[in-house]
Structures are given as C-alpha cells and as structure tokens.
Image: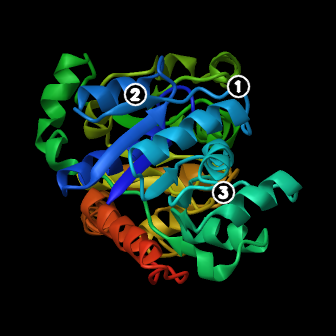
Amino acid sequence: MNILHLNTERGWRGGERQTLLLARALAARGHGVWVAGRPDDELLRRASGAGLPVLAAAPLFEFDIWTAGRLRRRLEDLSVDVLHAHTGHAAGLGALAVRGTRARLVVTRRVDFRLKRSFPTRWKYGRADAVACISNRILELVREAGVPAEKTIVIPSGIDPSSYPSRADRDRLRRERNVPRTDLVLVHVGALVPHKDQATLLRAVQRVAREEANLRLFIVGDGPLRGPLERLARELGVAGRTTFLGREPDPLSWTALADLFVFSSKEEGLGTALIDALALGVPTAATSAGGIPDIYGGPGAPELSPPGNPENLARNILSVLRDPAEASRRAARGRARAALFTVDAMTGSYEKLYGGLLASSLQPPASTL
C-alpha cells in the first residue's frame, strides 16, 4: 500500500513521535510511505533523517484550500491509497485533499478533549473513512460527537523499547547527573501545559516532602506554564527540591534513574511517557484521567489517583517510597502491561484497518484493547 502521513503540528510531542514511529514501521514492512508536514519543523527533519521521503505541507489555517490542492496533486502523482491524518487540523486539510481522489482518509484522534459541535468538525470527521482513537475514553467522546460507531476503532499508541536504557544503569545515570544515590527521586515527563496539571504534582510534592527529607523532583519538558509553575514551586516551598529541566534530548535517561515516575494529568489521550516508564521497569503513580486507565487495565489499578487531588496523589507516592515490595510489584505489573503497547502491534492494527478500507469494507476491525 501507499500511505501518506500528514501532521502539520509545530514542535515535537507525543503525536509527532507516534507519526514517525508508525511511518518507519510501515516502510520497514515494504509499504510506500511519505510524511507530510511543516518543512521547518522537527517531524520532517527526523523523518528525512530516518530515510523517509517527505513533503512540505504548511497550511496557513486548517481549511487552506491552496495547500489542500497541492496536496491533492501529490496524492494523485504518487498513487496514494491512504491519507492518514494524525491531528485534528490535519484531518480538515486531509478531508479537502482527498476529494476527487482514490485515497481513503484515516484520522487518528489522540486527545480526550470533547469535539466541537460545529459544521467544520462534523464535515471533516464525516468525510473520514475511519477514525482511530488511541484509547477507549477518546472512542466514547468521538461517538458522543456523532461519528458513526462503524467508522471508529481503538488503536493504542505504541513504543519501541529496543533502544531504551536499562534499569540497571540507574546508578551510572545518577552519577553522571550528580544525583545522590540517597535521594528519593520523582520524575515527570510532559509539556508544561494546562491539561498536564503539574500544579497538582507540585502540591503533592509539598505534602510528601514533609515526611521525606531527601525527596527530589525532576520535571522534563517545557511550555507556556513554565514561569507560573516555577513561581508556584517557590510559593509552596519546594523550589529547592524541584528542578525544571526543560526539553531534554534523552528524557528516557531521566525516567530510568527515578525511584518513581509520576503523571498528574487532568486530561490525557493515553500517555506514552507512562508506557515508557513501565517498559523501563520504573514504578509509577498516575491519575485516572482520560485514557490513562487503559494502560493499567482499568480504573481500579493501585497506581491511579483521582485527577486534581494532591492529597490522594501524595498518599499514592508515599505508598511506593515507603514500601519497596509495592515498588517491585508495580514495576513487574508495569513491564507486563507495557508489552501490550508496542509499535509492532500498532502497525499491524493500522495495516489491517487500511487493508479493510481498500477492500471497500466500511467496518473497521475489532478494537485492539
């Protein structure tokens, strides 16, 4: 099959990482693959570096008919079978581009925000041949918005841990970063944006620090809330034990040195940073927001706390820091759960979805989770 992946977001976050992982895996399986996006951004730089052919697509707005027209011509020139839009804005551009072509439109929905009940939203998702949701919560929201059930499917994000650092490297990683072995280290990885809710994490850390003098928190990621979060850390008295690292070229090395990986989102499509931690064998504490319960097999997992509740999150953190047996249990469970979220499984599910659409089947395969 010939598949063009479209992602016009700026920056490098989870959705862009997933776009590249899927494109590379499909190319390795012998499919024709192209990646279209903004020519001056990280996704196309990384795709080109991975040997994938890239196309420039830099719309001025979501329904940019001129960019869509250029994209339509490339679909025809390359005999593209499937245009796979990886973001909401890419879905609108893709819906315009596939008009009058043989290409089927697949849209992946990665966020658990409610879809706007507007004509543009209804039109672009109505034009899609299939909408793949990365979690069951997103599936619910997409169907609530009126997307027909027969067009929807759950295909979780995947990771490839073959190149990840080893948990056995923790002491070396700490030495290299001047982190004492005696410190109790919490690590969080995520953009500093409202739905990640690092404010709740800082308030939980304030409570845990009253009982654990050696507590340290490292926050990997950047975003518009960095300044307000740094001010909040000072107000809460935890600035001295909290380090804002900004964007890191190797965030996994920070996850690998942690005693506990903490995720505080109040909205979350799925959470591949959590899956990374599980694959590394790092115990985790998270919220039950959005699609996160899918990672743990359900909302009743001991790793989960209610969103926006620093007291409960603090108790969750302490239950691991005070009990090595609980930490070991969480690490073991985590490795088993992470094995369900692989790039290979994700790629196979998309291959099956594409193939069914090209065979003119309007019924996507059963959800994979």
Q: Which numbered disc, 3 or 2, marks the residue that appears first in the sequence?
A: 2
Q: Secondary structure at mark 2?
A: helix
Q: Is residue 324 visible?
A: yes
Q: Secondary structure at mark 1?
A: loop
Dot in front, 1 or 3? 1
Decide: is 129 above or below 314: below
- Mark identifier at residue 354: none
Is residue 328 found left or right of 289 in the rendered image?
A: left
Q: Is residue 214 visible?
A: no
- Could you tell me residue 4's position as x and y percent? 42, 47
Query: In terms of image quadrants, where is residue 287?
Result: bottom right
Is residue 196 found left or right of 16 in the rendered image?
A: right
Is residue 33 found left or right of 362 in the rendered image?
A: left
- Could you tell me residue 309's position as x and y percent? 69, 52
Q: Which residue is mark 3?
A: 112
Is residue 165 found left or right of 220 in the rendered image?
A: left
Q: Which residue is mark 2?
A: 44
Q: What's the amino acid at mark 1?
A: Leu
- Mark identifier at residue 60: 1
- Of residues 324 and 81, which is closer to you in this image? 81
Residue at 24 percent across and 49 percent down: it is 27
Q: What's the amino acid at mark 3?
A: Asp
Q: Secondary structure at mark 3?
A: loop
Decide: is 325 above or below 67: below
Location of the C terminus (image quadrant)? bottom left
Decide: is 337 above or below 331: below
Q: CA distance from mark 3 to mark 2?
A: 26 Å
- Of residues 3 and 220, which is closer to you in this image? 3
- Of residues 334 and 355, which is closer to you in this image? 355
